[in-house]
Image: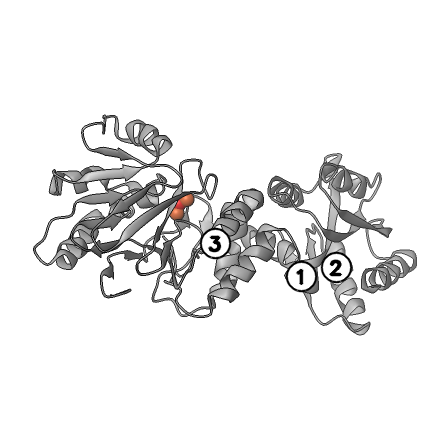
Amino acid sequence: MKITKDIKYIGVNDRDIDLFEGQYVVENGMAYNSYVISDDKIAVMDTVDERFGEQWLENLKAALLGRTPDYLVVQHMEPDHSANIVSFLKAYPGAKVVASAKAFAMMEQFFGRSFSDCSIVVKEGDTLSLGNHTLNFIAAPMVHWPEVIVTYDSTDKVLFSADGFGKFGALDADEDWACEARRYYFGIVGKYGAQVQTLLKKAAALDIKIIAPLHGPVLSENLGYYLGLYNTWSSYMPESEGVMIAYTSVYGHTKKAAELLKAELEALGCKKVVISDLAREDMAEAVEDAFRYDTLVLATTTYNADIFPFMREFINHLTERNFQKRRVGLIENGSWAPTAAKIMRKMFENSKELEFAETTVQIKSALSKQSREQISALAGELLKK
Ligand code: FEO
């Protein structure tokens, strides 16, 4: 696959993987992208997951048309991209590895050997000329690990964006970009919004025609759309108006409360209400929706003098990703000593700019006249501008 006259795609699709990074369900697989820039000198941009080493080396060989690569640029040391550095060097012993100082330290840890005989250490602002093409290195710490650099080819105006602008899904998956890019972003990079903002500011100074990430499709049209979404996500602003109701339910009573709230909100004209059973739905999808909409309602039971485990896990996912700038409503259920609302609220005590609804719904075992009225009051309150 040609990206530009001189840049070819040599990545692979992984349709065998069950959990990406050991936790994310990827029903449509995953792509590990890698590229070759052929000029007077030849640079290879990153490698792929270990299980696809042979296939990747074959793709590389075919793209080289009998030539030999001069450089392997390692932008990110996470093994989904870096597992084949040593096999690359075995195949092409004269090549140099180009990476940040932190990446070389990790490389030694991962491979248990020194790379000092073949390393070129680069940092923010350094360049590497391939002849006609010049690679400009830009530090992108914590997008997604501390050693990350991204690379701008100022000749073809291509930003090699490492994990940035990636998505779940193999390249042949027929699915919406934003849906799986958002779940990927909040799952993987969501905690590091400030660092993504820093990178976006650096990117704004560049004339970018193509974004070539390490996962997901190469982006070459309507780049403002993708950059705009990344700006929204990394600044923690809601992307859409709407209410997400996340619940856990043991015997169905809390579920009924969540469904009643959904119906009340819709009856009042709320155009978008999504509801998620945290015990059954994909947690990463639920996290994505919490960050997508401007309002979140949490409904759970008191359990072991705490809250139901799936809700605790969900709130932990949100707070560790700096959940903020949202309206929040709480529904608690308890048969003898309901404390879930208090516990949920305390879990957000360090979160910024959360506006809690005045009405907290309290269910004692099952819905009652009083708790139904509280749900109506909460629905009305959440839709007030
Ligand atoms: Fe795709 Fe952070 O590795």
Q: Secondary structure at mark 2?
A: helix
Task: Residue type at mark 1: give it.
Answer: Ile
User: What is the x, y in percent for residue 362?
Assistant: 85, 49
Tag shown at residue 152: none
The residue indicated by pointer 2 is 258
Name which of mark 2 and mark 1 comes first in the sequence: 2
- Give the alpha-carbon distance from disc 3 to disc 2, as whole Å: 46 Å
Query: Which amino acid type is shown beneath numbered disc 3?
Result: Ala
Taking depth in this image into account, of 261 and 291 the one nearest to the observer is: 291
User: For the residue marked with disc 2, what is the amino acid?
Assistant: Ala
Would you say the beta carbon of the disc 1 residue lies within 8 angstroms of ligand 1?
no
Q: CA distance from mark 2 to mark 1?
A: 8 Å
Helix, strand or loop for disc 3: loop
Asked which quadrant contains residue 380, the reply is bottom right
- Binning the other alpha carbons within 10 Å of mark 2 as few (below 14), some (14 to 19) or many (20 upward) gives many
Disc nearer the start of the sequence (3/2): 3
Q: Which residue, given by chain and number where applicable, does mark 3 sit on?
A: 205
Q: Nearer the viewer, mark 1 or mark 3?
A: 3
Q: Residue at x 52, y 66 (%)?
A: 225
Q: Are marks 2 and 1 in contact (CB under 8 Å)?
A: yes
Look at the image and tell me in which quarter the C terminus lies: bottom right
Look at the numbered discs 1 and 3 and tell me whether their residues touch, using CB distance below 8 Å: no
Q: Quadrant of ligand 1?
A: top left
Quick check: 6 left or right of 359? left
Q: Nearer the viewer, residue 139 or 59?
A: 139
First in residue order: circle 1 vs circle 3: 3
Is label 3 or label 2 in front? 3
Expressed as whole percent of the image width and height from the top left, the position of residue 155 reads 30, 58
In the foreground, 7 or 362: 7
